[in-house]
Amino acid sequence: MPSRRDLANAIRALSMDAVQKAASGHPGAPMGMADIAEVLWRDLLVHNPANPRWVDRDRFVLSNGHASMLLYSLLQLTGYPLSMDQLRNFRQLGSHTAGHPERDLDLGIETTTGPLGQGFANAVGMALAEKMLAAQFNRDDHRIVDHHTWVFLGDGCMMEGISHEAASLAGTLGLGKLICIYDDNGISIDGRVEGWMKDDTPKRFAAYGWQVIPNVDGHDAEAIGKALKRAKANRRQPTLICCKTTIGWGAPNKQGTKATHGEALGVEEVAATRAALGWPYEPFVIPDEIRAAWDQRERGARAERAWKRRFNRYRKAHPELAAEFERRMRGTLPATWPALREQAVAAATAVEAAQATRASSQVVLNAIGPGMPELVGGSADLTGSVNTFRKDSRAITTEDCSGNYVNYGVREFAMTAMMNGLALHGGFIPYAGTFLVFSDYARNAVRLAALMQQRVLLVYTHDSIGLGEDGPTHQPVEHLASLRAMPNLSLWRPCDAVETAAAWRAGVERDTGPTALVLTRQALPQQPRSPARELAIARGGYVLIDCHGTPEAIVIATGSEVAPAAEAVRSLNDAGRRLRLVSMPSVDIFEAQDAAWREAVLPAAITRRLAVEAGATQCWWRYVGSSGRVLGIDRFGASGKAADLFRHYGLTAANVIQAVEALLAS
């Protein structure tokens, strides 16, 4: 029977060999954490390699994603469908073994990690999802949601600010089934971290309300096992296990140094390491007895069968709850969704007075929320400003996680990454709000939501200089253009209540990526439109106002600028001109339409075009061309009343008329 050290050495060998073959990668952390991983994955982690999507599996997150070969080795050794050829092709184009892990549930990769701290915050969201689902579905006699979230993280994760945000909230909410193992090796790319990180990490996490298990020898299997079991026994607090490890353990001439962190060991050191470890096998060869000891498929199948028996008993006792649980974990919308979205449209259509689209958003949420228990809301300490609290909202607390609203506090970055974790876990469609300007704080988490194609709804209010007196620090200018540049992020900037309802419908129905809903602070008039034009909103861009005959020019506007553009177009048309107004609440959705629709809305032959938006002009030149014009803002805002600011920056009906007349005269 192979020893634990022999089994851990399989990880070390695979990791150093894959990095050496690729001539790229990070062998040090996998080699340093191999002993910890062996104990966790063989003794405590509840998972089934034959069914990586089993809903009550433990979640494992490698937050220090540069140590990707640790995860790939574990998946290969324990029986997941990740072939040895994939390890041989580590970091190569087309392989499933990218330089940093990329979410692939069929292979057992729970989340995309690499930007340090992101995986940790994702895991906090996953642990919150588990606690919320347990509160909503478990009954005294049946526990169908009962799993842990395990995280490996390193010094880099600890240094990133997001770890402070996420750890603080995890402690506050008492996420007792979140267990983090800190690879405390004291080395980063630049060398020994003591020169730039003197934090007392155990005291820091204890202050957050965590259970902390310090000074665990990360190369002593018995000590590791005791710490993991102690962590699992505490369900009141999240746990941080501080494991003292040696980076690159086993490499006789380089272990404990930055030389093992971000580069291959080199041919000579790989040979020396093989000798030091007593590992005589060729690269990528695992002897049968070691492979058999690692294989977790039989143990995993037993665990899943036991859960299925529990779930079948639950189904008999609570058939409606069981069906609802299965629906939510599949990610399908409720059967009542068509009726709910019609209710939302009706509620939006009933709005007659001028209304801020942030308020229109709340109208929509009040229509759809009560029928969608998976729709979990929140905000970054701006609930009253972003209007994300709906009539059926109930805040989650440490003692009661059966609610549907998270007070994230002033933590925009952690909020967004935790929303990713909620979505990744399954069972929830998360939405939460902050001011558009603060999307900068959260941008990397937004990017990862897009990269992972997660259904996350980002409610961004106070979308322009229209927020007024708070001034340029709070007035977004470049943000719309910046977010539109992000692949796979869908962005909506509606002009009134009906467009806001269409935006929410699109976001809820879109299960291939995040959606940003960009909303105003100031009241906007409701635009009249025919039923056909109301349906056309779903295409992202449509003709809101048209003329008789071929238009002489086209005006394109979004959000709050539709109102002055509409006033100008109607005035010019009444004066005998032929103008078309195109409302384009979603550029990306419009771009996804067929060529015939895009040509019908924006005929190529009509080159006199004007775009109007209270933001950077950059993204609009593609629509107006070199002969067109853009009214926008390519400088920072100012503090003042909204109406005064719009006049100051020229975003008025009078200026639109002047710009159109200049186009027509050219």
Image (tube, helix red, strand yellow):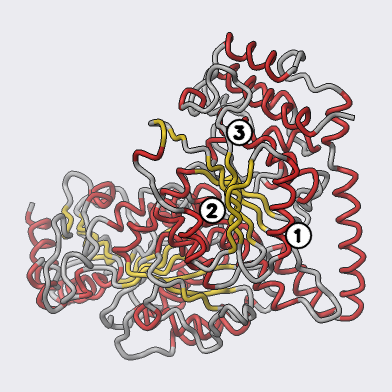
Category of crowding for the residue at label 3, using alpha-carbon neighbours closer than 10 angstroms: few (below 14), some (14–19), many (at least 20): many
Residue at the image position 42 percent from the left and 79 percent from the top: 361
Percent coordinates x, y for residue 483 in the rendering: 35, 54
Q: In this rendering, does residue 625 appear at all?
A: yes
Q: Which mark is residue 120?
A: 2
Which corner quadrant holds the N terminus? top right
Q: Is residue 381 left or right of residue 606?
A: right
Residue type for callout 3: Gly
Q: Which residue is mark 1?
A: 55
Q: Which mark is residue 32?
A: 3
- The front one of 357 and 418 is 418
Q: Is residue 444 above or below residue 81?
A: below
Category of crowding for the residue at label 2, using alpha-carbon neighbours closer than 10 angstroms: few (below 14), some (14–19), many (at least 20): many
Nearer the camera: disc 1 or disc 2:
2
What's the CA distance linking mark 2 and mark 3?
Answer: 19 Å
Q: Is residue 573 left or right of residue 247?
A: left
